[in-house]
Image (spheres, grey):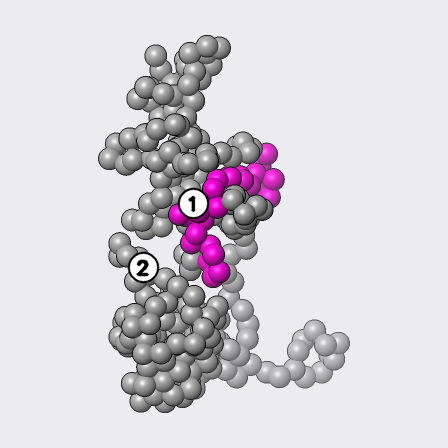
């Protein structure tokens, strides 16, 4: 029988839902069945205590169409959101199938929005559909003195590998990581930059640098997830000023601000400039 015929059948249906959470090549695979399900080369594991969702909605309003998944508190993918959440979104694809039926249908796609624990033994994973991204306002060019471009991003075009320093965590105290060798770059060289460290499978997590003094880097979100002795990559930061763009990065042609913007506003009611 086909998926459609069993889906509409009154007696022969045996529905199973597969949840594929992914970040890059990393995967967390679960199913609602009482045994593991193999799909292609992937094994979707049965969950002790069960995993379920509150149903797929397609109202057209992303705020209404959020999907709530409940599972045991120790679910591996939920553990990523204890403390500081991952620096990259974790995607979710849901597949529907029937037991012993080879046909599989993609039922839903989106990403994790947040994770909570309403009970000691339960987690709730709130997921937003892909359509939610369409309602987000895109980046715009701003008429301002400071540069509006994202450092090392499109428009800025600075090669971040030229401003990367490979280092290790010599010490840490929950708010900052330290390595004495970083002091040679001078205070503030890494302020507004970031560090990244490997979390396995070629994936890296990142943490913004709020302030750098000597070899100390104060991190936005603290040091959760970083281990003493970890290898880190440290990237120089930018304060978005034209002088920094010129002297530090030699990137004046790509500066996105208007350094000589007039101090008077055309909207202050004064008709004379």
Residue depicted at 51% across the width and 44% down the height: 121
Asked whether, in this view, residue 128 is left or right of residue 150, the answer is right
Query: Which residue range is magenta in the image?
Result: 59-85
Residue receiving disc 2: 199
Asked whether, in this view, residue 144 is left or right of residue 228, the answer is right
Residue 210: x, y in percent?
A: 47, 76
Which one is closest to the eye, mark 2 or mark 1?
Answer: 1
Q: Quadrant of residue 199?
A: bottom left
Residue 250: x, y in percent?
A: 33, 82
Residue depicted at 34% across the width and 68% down the height: 227
Q: Quadrant of residue 5?
A: top left
Residue depicted at 30% across the width and 22% down the height: 102
In this rendering, is residue 263 above or below 144? Answer: below
Q: Is residue 251 visible?
A: no
Residue 100: x, y in percent?
A: 32, 19
Q: Is residue 65 magenta?
A: yes
Q: Is residue 119 magenta?
A: no
| Label 2 neighbour load within 10 Å: few <14, some 14-19, many 20+ | few
Q: Quadrant of the C terminus?
A: bottom right
Residue depicted at 32% across the width and 78% down the height: 170
Residue 30: x, y in percent?
A: 38, 37
Magenta portion: prevailing SS class: loop
Local secondary structure at mark 1 = loop
Q: Calculate the distance from the C-alpha at mark 2 to the C-alpha at mark 1.
A: 18 Å
In this rendering, is residue 258 above or below 6? Answer: below
| Label 1 neighbour load within 10 Å: few <14, some 14-19, many 20+ | some
- Ranked by sequence position, the earlier of labels 2 and 1 is 1
Task: Judge by depth and name the residue closer to the eye, 62 or 52.
Answer: 52
Residue receiving disc 1: 75
In this rendering, is residue 252 above or below 117? Answer: below
């Amino acid at each position: 029988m086909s998926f459609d015929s069993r889906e509409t059948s009154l007696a022969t249906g045996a529905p199973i839902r597969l949840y594929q959470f992914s970040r890059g090549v990393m995967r967390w695979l679960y199913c609602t069945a009482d045994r593991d399900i193999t799909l292609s080369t992937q094994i979707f594991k049965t969950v002790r205590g069960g995993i379920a969702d509150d149903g797929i909605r397609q109202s057209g309003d992303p705020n209404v169409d959020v999907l709530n998944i409940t599972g045991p508190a120790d679910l591996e993918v939920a553990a990523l959101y204890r403390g500081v959440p991952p620096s990259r979104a974790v995607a979710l694809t849901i597949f529907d199938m029937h037991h012993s039926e080879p046909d599989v249908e993609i039922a839903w796609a989106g990403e994790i929005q947040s994770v909570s624990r309403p009970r000691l033994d339960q987690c709730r994973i709130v997921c937003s559909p892909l359509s939610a991204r369409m309602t987000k306002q895109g980046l715009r060019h701003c008429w301002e003195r400071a540069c509006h471009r994202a450092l090392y991003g499109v428009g800025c075009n600075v090669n971040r590998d030229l401003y990367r320093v490979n280092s290790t965590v010599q010490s840490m105290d929950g708010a900052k990581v330290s390595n004495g060798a970083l002091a040679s770059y001078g205070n503030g060289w890494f302020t507004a930059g970031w560090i990244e460290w490997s979390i396995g499978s070629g994936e890296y997590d990142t943490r913004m640098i709020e302030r750098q003094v000597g070899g100390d880097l104060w991190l936005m979100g603290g040091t959760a997830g970083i281990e003493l002795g970890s290898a880190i990559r440290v990237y120089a930061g930018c304060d978005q000023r034209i002088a920094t763009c010129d002297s530090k990065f030699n990137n004046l042609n790509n500066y996105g601000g208007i350094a000589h913007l007039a101090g008077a506003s055309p909207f202050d009611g004064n008709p004379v400039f």
